[in-house]
Amino acid sequence: MSVRRSTQSRRTVMKAGAAGALGLTGAVVAEGLPATAAAADSGHLVGRGIADATGEVAEVGMMGYGRIDQQAAGLHTRLRARAFIVVDRASGRRVLLVVVDCAMIFESVRQKVVKRLAQKYGALYGDGNVLITATHSHSGPGGYSHHLLYNLTTLGFHRKTFDAMVEGIVEAVQRAHDDIAPSDLLLSHGRLTGASINRSRAAFDRNPEADRRHFPSAVDPQTTLLRVERMGRPVGAINWFPVHGTSMSGENRLISGDNKGFAAYHWEHEVHDVDYRSPASPEFVAAFAQTNSGDMSPNLDLKPPTTPEDFAHTQASGLRQYEAAAAQLHRPGTRLSGSVDSRLVYIDLSRTTVRPEFTGDGRVHRTSKPCIGASMAAGSVEDGPAFPGLEEGENSFWDTVSDSLIYETSPELKAAQFPKDILAPIGEANRLYPWVQERVPVMLIRIGRLYLIGIPGEVTVCAGLRLRRTVASVVGAEVEDVLVAGYANAYFHYLTTPEEYDAQHYEGGSTLFGRWQLPALQQTAHELAVSLRDGTSLPMGPQSPDLSDKALSMQPGVVVDVPQFFKSFGDVVVRPRESYRAGERVEVVFAGAHPSNNLRRGRTYLEVQRREANGTWRTIADDSDWATRFHWEREGIAASRVRITWDVWRGIAPGIYRIVYHGDSKSVTGTVTPFAGTSPAFSVR
């Protein structure tokens, strides 16, 4: 099934159905709004922004599955950053919410973004009021962390991908800042079933009945929508629903926003006809954010999809999420009022003392230095296994090593990490070089009755429920109005309940700081909630160091491009047929160059054009469209073969069309020169 670019009939149907660290140093008055006017006026100011955050699309390791063989070889859909700024007109306090189509947000990215925003806006956006989250697509480029573990399969740090993500986020924020205007915020909740399944049911079933009763099907079906309205018309929305970004398989080699990326693309582009390359403010901005999706898989048969069938899986999952979100536009929702506020602290999870009221057994416990479990290396077989020879649960060899050597040597480690079969005491490696982050940010945001707990990792539904209940009990909120904002601001792998941890499935083996990691974070969330409720400040704690000078890059860049023999850059190698029908696939092959020479952020590698009556050519699709694909492969040592496909959508106007390829070649002296190639025209009947 191909999704066509917007037509009037499709849009009609869809529309008919459809101050620095805030809380720490005081309020920030809304820019351009005098303090006296702000105090006299209630309601919110809201800004929305979208920008391209796509990094490298060729010869870069993809992030998520941990497979060194999953090297990107082209582009299916561009990755985007979506930003929302909410300002309380009464107090002037503001928060910035950013959702990025990527696997994780690393501290490296957040530090650079906050620094760039400070240079541009002073104290308006800082550590205490900026929440950056990831959609957790497993089909984006990697190499943008400053911690070594996440760059092993990408052959080190990739500066171009890192810069593209940072630039995209900053640009989205800038556009949201320029878009700030009086707006209404409405909150609603729904239920979405048939879109997720618990991939770790045996671990889930270890939880007490009070937790399991909340999720009778072992999934979190809550879909929450925060919509932005101006003059009674929806102009933006953030949807939260927990499901992994693993609809695209580990066999895929094209950069993709996965299911949440498709949901956002569909709502913006297919329903509202948003032109991503237009400088104008978009009619609608839709972000599909994660919550506690640690054990929620989109693969309902508990088997990873194969390629190319995974494209249909991705589309189906994204459509379900879109439909559940868009259906809430028909409900009145709760109009949000009240304050906007936020708190952020850093905690050192390698040595946090957890008080008895949070441990569940009435005793004091401590977290420990991070350790990787054997079951983490085994991977999640439902979404794509990792290293062969290792399994979820018990691994007898590593169990023997842990019990007879590691735990005997370090009783403190045993008290925190048992019964984990320790594959790698990664905390010891941290003493020599930064492999994983130990000092992590934890955040709490309030927008009226909505509370967001920013957790830098993958939270299971029951672990999320306990965090939500902890905050709700302090602030007096309904649990459904308190959400975990997962994959937020940094990354520390997984977060399970102690009971789930004991099962040592993939999620438990990936809970790096041991059995008491969740209680430690409940304790922190409680402190944040008390501070937010009482209007008191909190010390920020031991911030994570800037490691930008330690990043290792092991993969060389593009050396030189040469065309195939007897060809020039942009020449057509394989011509299209003379005519096509709707539903067929157009394919053209060009003599190309390496796409890393120019990432074309905010632009495109390809265009599908239609000839107008006056003889001019009009672009009807580009490389951000679902129906197009950009494939790259190396030929020989320095030549590139670029294959562009376009699935002709149903209902398209008959006429004459062509494919245009935009590339950039690198000479032996390092000069990068743009070029273009154009296919012969073909008819669509």
Image (cartoon, rainbow, N blue to C red):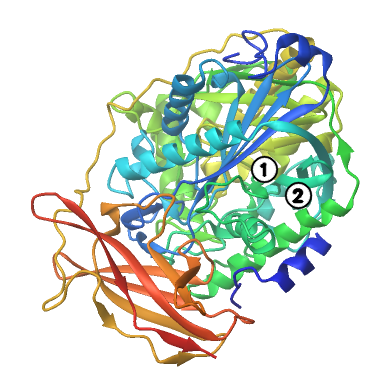
Name the residue that disc number 1 marks.
292
Quarter location, residue 533? top right
Decide which of 421, 426 is in the foreground and name it: 426
The local secondary structure at tag 1 comes to loop
Residue 569 percent across, percent down from the top left: 20, 69
User: Looking at the image, which residue is at 42% across and 28% down?
Assistant: 112
Quarter location, residue 596? bottom left
> Looking at the picture, does residue 149 appear above or below residue 370?
below
Q: Which amino acid does label 2 sit on?
A: Asp
Residue 519 percent across, percent down from the top left: 66, 26
Near mark 2 (Cα within 10 A), the count class, few <14, some 14-19 or many ≥20, is many
Along the polypeptide, which appears first: circle 2 or circle 1?
Answer: 2
Name the residue that disc number 2 marks.
220
Near mark 1 (Cα within 10 A), the count class, few <14, some 14-19 or many ≥20, is many
The local secondary structure at tag 2 comes to loop
Q: Whole-Å distance between the Cαs marked 2 and 1?
A: 8 Å
Decide which of 262, 94 is in the foreground and name it: 94
Q: Can residue 368 be seen in this view?
A: no
Left or right: residue 174 versus residue 38 is: left
Labelled pair 2, 1 in contact (Cβ < 8 Å): yes
Residue 147 percent across, percent down from the top left: 37, 34
Quarter location, residue 570? bottom left
User: Looking at the image, which residue is at 59% across and 19% down?
Assistant: 128
Q: Can residue 644 be seen in this view?
A: yes
Q: What residue type is labelled 1?
A: Asn
Residue 291 percent across, percent down from the top left: 67, 42
Looking at the rendered structure, which numbered label has been put on residue 501?
none
